Image (tube, rainbow, N blue to C red):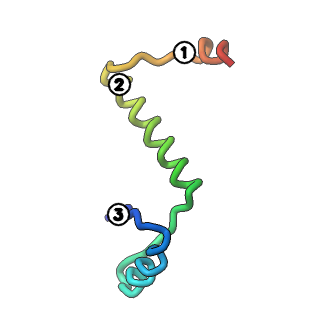
Amino acid sequence: MKLLIEVPDKKANFIIEVLNNFSYIKTKIITKEKKQILSELNESVQQINSFKKGKIKLRNARDFLKTL
């Protein structure tokens, strides 16, 4: 199982140290850049799911490229 825990920066080192004392827990630090990428990816997945449910309509590639 994977868990994502948000911790204030000033407490992060302490929490990581505590978690690393358990041999069965692996920790991984997510940088702000990775957090932003994951957030954008999550938003994209939500849009795809909304499209599949018929809640939104997507533009085709040709219309998208015309706006650039």
Q: Which mark is residue 52?
A: 2
Q: Label 2 vs label 3: CA separation?
A: 28 Å
> Which of label 2 and label 3 is nearer to you?
3
Task: Please name the residue that numbered disc 1 is placed on.
Answer: 60
Element at badge 3?
Answer: loop
Residue 40 position in % (x across, y down): 50, 41
Q: x and y percent of residue 59 in the render?
A: 51, 16
Name the spot of residue 31 as percent of width and height, x first. Answer: 56, 61
Q: Amino acid at mark 3?
A: Leu
Which image quarter holds the C terminus? Answer: top right
Q: Quadrant of the N terminus?
A: bottom left
Label 2: state its secondary structure. helix
Q: Which residue is mark 3?
A: 3
The residue carrying pointer 3 sits among few (fewer than 14), some (14 to 19) or many (20 or more) residues within 10 Å by Cα, namely: few
Is 60 positioned to the left or the right of 56 in the image? right
What kind of residue is marked 1?
Asn
Amino acid on which the number 2 mark rests in the picture: Lys
Residue drawn 49% across the image and 49% down it: 38
Q: Nearer the viewer, residue 8 or 20?
A: 8
Asked which quadrant contains residue 32, the reply is bottom right
Q: Say whether disc 1 or disc 2 marks the residue closer to the N-terminus.
A: 2
Q: Kindly give the residue lying farthest to the front in the view shown.
A: 10
